[in-house]
């Protein structure tokens, strides 16, 4: 599985959690009934994901084989 999921496990866990949050909003039909709130939450989750990756990329060294 290391050939498929390259990079630190924390990146994949945070990506999974953010995807789960956005997916659960879609299951609640928030993108239909409250579109503005849906977009705000998607932007916030995306910004937090980007901030986490940029903040921790210097601390975690990624080794390619």
Image (cartoon, rainbow, N blue to C red):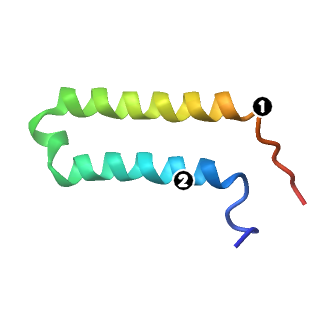
Which quadrant, please, contains the N terminus? Answer: bottom right
Residue at (61% x, 47% y) in the render:
11
State whether residue 3 is above or below residue 57. Answer: below
Residue at (58% x, 33% y) in the render:
52
First in residue order: circle 1 vs circle 2 = 2
**Residue 55 percent coordinates (x, y):** 66, 28
Question: Badge 2 local density, few (<14 within 10 Å), some, or many (20+)?
Answer: few
**Circle 1: element type:** loop
**CA gap, disc 1 to disc 2?**
18 Å
Which residue is denoted by mark 1 in the rendering? 58
3 on left or right of 50: right
Residue lying farthest left? 33
Residue at (41% x, 50% y) in the render:
19
State whether residue 3 is above or below residue 29. Answer: below
Q: Quadrant of residue 59?
A: top right
Q: Quadrant of residue 33?
A: top left
39 on left or right of 10: left
State whether residue 44 is above or below residue 21. Answer: above
State whether residue 2 is above or below residue 28. Answer: below
Identify the disc placed on residue 13. Answer: 2
Identify the disc placed on residue 29. Answer: none
Residue at (51% x, 35% y) in the render:
49
**Residue 17 percent coordinates (x, y):** 43, 50
**Circle 2: element type:** helix
Q: Quadrant of residue 35?
A: top left
**Residue 53 percent coordinates (x, y):** 63, 35
């Amino acid at each position: 599985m290391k050939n498929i999921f390259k990079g630190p496990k924390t990146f994949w866990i945070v990506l999974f959690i953010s995807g789960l949050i956005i997916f659960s909003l879609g299951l609640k039909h928030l993108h239909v009934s409250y579109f503005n709130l849906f977009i705000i939450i998607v932007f916030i989750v995306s910004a937090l994901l980007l901030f986490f990756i940029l903040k921790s990329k210097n601390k975690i060294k990624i080794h390619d084989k």
